[in-house]
Amino acid sequence: GDSVTQKQGQVTLSEDDFLFINCTYSTTTYPTLLWYVQYLGQGPQLLLKVTTANNKGISRGFEATYDKGTTSFHLQKASVQESDSAVYFCALVASGSWQLIFGSGTQLTVMP
Amino acid sequence: AQTIHQWPVAEIKAVGSPLSLGCTIKGKSSPNLYWYWQATGGTLQQLFYSITVGQVESVVQLNLSASRPKDDQFILSTEKLLLSHSGFYLCAWGTGDYAEQFFGPGTRLTVL
């Protein structure tokens, strides 16, 4: 079946550091790849969407790209701020599917 | 703009007691609706989805049930709570298959 692997459980950075989070996926279809951010006590918010058509998404200073060859997709930000501290989830929607499959999440802590 | 409301915000219930959680979406006609469960510090697990009024599909079996009595309303319930039902319950809406989903603020459930 379809799956997503997110190995970085915790990332601690200082303000203005570069952020890079990686996920790998497995599917037999053409997926839509998503990044969600969840602040403490809140529901997840959609941050970025990447499809096989557009390869890249940009929002709020974050950039998402995917690599079909290595079946991986990445979230990056050039300069993180303390307010970016949250849990970041990658997710996959397989073509023709109603199901959103989430990675295990990356807790980002940004120190002032 | 679409808004999604969940009630209650939080619940503390005894093992063996019944439960009913609700979700309402405004500003979107005939949305796909979804229920998710999230353990503390964990990832999101899809529980149910509904494409139309009166029709609900189960994704995982957790001794829970769901119903969609109106186009804009989704209910999650059980007659007998277990300790393992504790967690964060999230309602989400989407526009179709192969598409992103948008989450509500969630309901925190503690079963004692």
Image: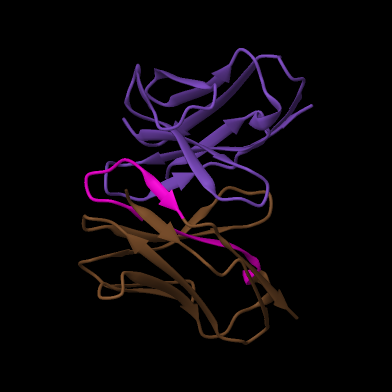
Chain colours: A brown, B purple
In the image, what residue occupies the spot 35% across and 16% down? B54
In the image, B16: left or right of A45?
right
In the image, what residue occupies the spot 60% across and 80% down? A80
In the image, B32: left or right of B62?
left
Q: Is residue A19 magenta?
A: no
Q: Give percent across and percent down for residue B10.
A: 71, 32
Residue A62 showing in the rendered view = no
In the image, what residue occupies the spot 63% across and 87% down? A16
Q: Give percent across and percent down for residue B38.
A: 59, 43
Q: In this view, does A33 lie above or below B78?
A: below
Q: Give percent across and percent down for residue B109.
A: 69, 32
Specify start and end residues of the magenta stretch as a single range: A84-102
In the image, B66: left or right of B42?
left
Q: Give percent across and percent down for residue A75.
A: 45, 73
Which quarter of the figure is the C terminus of chain A placed in?
bottom right
Furthest-front residue in this view: A1
Q: In which quarter of the image is residue B73?
A: top left
Judging depth in this view, the residue of A82 and A29 nearest the camera is A29
Q: Is residue A96 magenta?
A: yes
Q: In this view, does B9 lie above or below A91?
A: above
Residue A106 showing in the rendered view = yes
In the image, what residue occupies the spot 45% across and 32% down? B60
Judging depth in this view, the residue of B20 and B29 nearest the camera is B20
